Amino acid sequence: MIFSAVSKYSLVNAKVRSRLSTLLTPEHINRLAEARDLAEFYAALDGTVYQEILSKPEISFDPRVGEKLLMEQEAGWHSELLRDLRGAEKDLVSHFLEKYEIENLKVALRIREGKRGAEEIKYIIRKELPHSLAYQAISEAATMDDAVSYLRGSPFLKAVEAVYDEYREKKTLFPIEINLEIDYYDRLRSLIGDLSKRDRDVARRLVGLEIDQMNLGWMVRLKFYYNVPAGDLMDYNIPGGYRIKQDRLHKALMADSIREVISLALGKSFKNASDILTGDEQKIGRLYLLEIILWNHLITEARKTLAGFPFTIGTILSYLILKRTEIRNLITIMNGKIYKMDRSEIESHLRISF
């Protein structure tokens, strides 16, 4: 059994271990946050794997292109891992690439609905993705029926059709966007079920922690900012959470304050969760703080996984989590420089548990 795992993961593990050595240190991230402007930020990345990406001339004309290029490189690094995988493991790692497509699709649909400017289409990522969706055509479709027709042949059509009547009734994209996420994780859990027992256990833990983060963020946002009735909240829940089980979620959604919702949902399961409960209600309502606490817990679990038995799917998933964290931090700092945020404000939005 062990020899089988070694054979299965030896090539991809060598690639992953090499890439892990290129991750930026917390000290480097701090230096980037201290940069006085974008030029200094770019210069501070000289000699790193990001030097070539952020030295492209088009970035000097439009800094937001830098975010797109980083995301495309992230997807590219992800796709390269597939070359050394086979079977259920390859199917699982490939599935994660659909997350980029869902975000692209949301942007295209929001443009079509007039919720985003048409220029936003140029910032979506297009490289190294599993399906060739016609994002431009979707964004320019005369009707939503026309837009949905462009999803034929993709795994997203079924998820959109399932809530299409609700979209028409409520005249909001919200049911479609939520169901795309729920369907994505439903199919992901099915793929995890095809793995070996050791791999299933690792994958369910890491993916479950990400589901915890999404469920709690949605619950707070829907209950207190969109006034969704408590009885409807469980319809917008992704099964498969690792720490925040369904019974705990159900109890939390009946609470009357953000503080109580978070307290009941998190319990004592998450290190530093008490940090968000010590401030006033306005501070507690800052969802990015909640996201950071839960994401930092996921980073910690990824690090623990890397320190364990190396020949499991966990090594790959942990690398993807850490790389995604690093790139989100770079994008946060870039945007901070673009909008002239001070260092303390930028740092408050960073995921820092490296």
Image (cartoon, grey):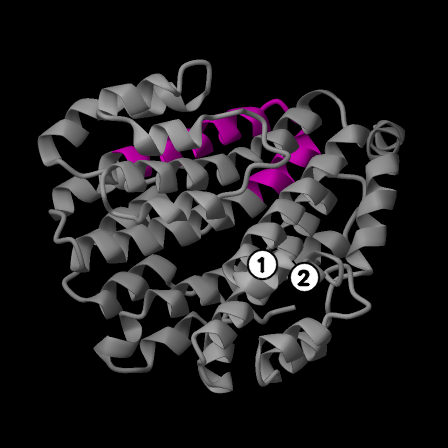
Cβ atoms under marks 1 and 2 closer than 8 Å: yes
Residue at disc 2, secondary structure: helix
Q: Is residue 277 above or below residue 97?
A: below
Q: Residue furthest top?
A: 153
**Residue sitting nearer the eye, 1 or 18:** 18
Query: Dot 1, how many residues are within 10 Å of its Cα: few (below 14), some (14-19), or many (20+)?
Result: many
Residue located beneath label 2 in the image: 54
Q: Amino acid at mark 1?
A: Gly
Q: Which secondary structure class fits the magenta region best?
A: helix
Residue 240 visible from this viewpoint? no
Q: Is residue 160 above or below residue 218?
A: above
Name the residue at 24% across, 35% down: 175
Name the residue at 29% across, 27% down: 141
Sequence order check: which comes first, mark 1 or mark 2?
2
Question: Left of 93 or right of it: where is 237?
Answer: left
Question: Left of 257 or right of it: where is 138?
Answer: right
Quadrant of image for the N terminus = top right
Name the residue at 57% across, 36% down: 97
Q: Amino acid at mark 2?
A: Leu
Residue located beneath label 1 in the image: 66
Question: Left of 124 or right of it: where is 223?
Answer: left
Can residue 199 be found in the magenta stretch?
yes
Q: Quadrant of residue 54?
A: bottom right
Segment colored magenta: 176-205
Spatial separation of the CA atoms under disc 1 and disc 2? 6 Å
Provide residue 125's location: percent of width, then percent of height.
Answer: 54, 42
Provide residue 352's location: percent of width, then percent of height.
Answer: 58, 71
